[in-house]
Structure formats: C-alpha cells, structure tokens
Image: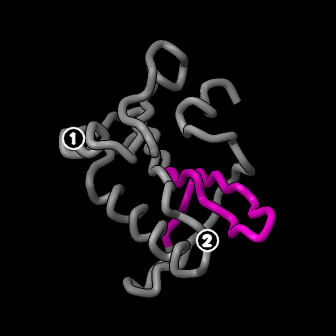
Amino acid sequence: MGPGRSLLGTSVGAAGSGVVTDPRERRQAQVDVAVVEPGSGGSRPSVALLGEAKWGTVMGVGHLERLGRARESLAARGLDAAHCGLAFFSAAGFSDSLRTAAERGGVLLVGLDELYGRAMPTGFVP
C-alpha cells in the first residue's frame, strides 16, 4: 500500500467502503474509503480512516462535518474511533476552510497531484 503506513501511522487494515447510519440526522452517510483494523486480544475493532471521494466537486467543511458524524456514529456502536483520521480525495480541489482544517491535523487531502505521486498529501492523520 505504498505510503499508507506512513500516512496513517499504523499498518493498513482491511479497506473498503460502505454506508453509516447517522441516527442524530436520521440519514445515511456514504463512506467511499474505510480502513478498519480488526480487534485482537480482547481489543475492539478500530477505524483508522474514513474517506470521501469526489471527481468534479470542490470539497469543503460540509464534507468534513458529514464524515465526522459518521465517525461519531461508529464510535457509538462500539468501534474504537479515537485515532480515526478523515481523508478527502478530489480532482476539483478543496476549499480554503478544509485546507485550514487539514493543517490542524486529523484530516488528509489528496488531489490529483497526490494521487499520481507528484506530491505528498496535505495534512496528516493521528
């Protein structure tokens, strides 16, 4: 998985996608990328990363809030999401406010340059 280990700070577990029900908003949130580490030795399964991908949409804080709620919903169901980072993949780019959030940490931004290996992603995850 190339730089996955260095970007996540852990080994890359099972990767997939799915839908998370948000009981507070009474909606479902599509999760395009989910990296989950199985629990072992009595530990709970942990979510290392949740991500959203868009081709023609500039991603912003609304996308961040939606994935944040999905992370909270998974934690409420008993998964360990204490160190879960949020990642955004977009060909159209990212809003200034989302870039600011990525600089604070816990958020990873991957555009076309990063996807094709011409640059390292902006931000970092715990």
Q: Is residue 49 inside the magenta stretch? A: yes
Q: Nearer the viewer, mark 2 or mark 1?
A: 2
Residue in the image at 57% along x and 29% along y: 6
Residue in the image at 65% along x and 57% along y: 17
Residue at the right extreme of this rendering = 41
For label 1, the residue is 100
Answer above or below: position of 9 versus 66. above
Secondary structure found at label 2: loop
Secondary structure found at label 1: helix
Task: Using the numbered discs, state the Cα–Cα distance from disc 2 to disc 1 in whole angstroms.
Answer: 28 Å
Kind of residue at disc 1: Thr
Classify residue 69 by image quadrant. Answer: bottom left
Q: Is residue 17 inside the magenta stretch? A: no
Foreground pick, 55 / 3: 3
Residue 22, numbered circle: none
Which of the two discs, 2 and 1, labels the residue nearer the N terminus?
Answer: 2
Q: Quadrant of the N terminus?
A: top right
Foreground pick, 54 / 8: 8
Answer above or below: position of 82 versus 12. below
Classify residue 10 by image quadrant. Answer: top right
Residue 70 seen by the camera: yes
**Category of crowding for the residue at label 2, using alpha-carbon neighbours closer than 10 angstroms: few (below 14), some (14–19), many (at least 20):** many
Residue in the image at 51% along x and 50% along y: 51
For label 2, the residue is 79
Answer above or below: position of 124 versus 80. above
Do the residues under discs 2 and 1 have CB atoms within 8 angstroms?
no
Principal SS element in the magenta part? strand
How many labels, in total? 2
Q: Which residues are magenta?
A: 29-51
Q: Position of residue 31 (x, y in %)?
A: 55, 60
Residue 58 seen by the camera: no
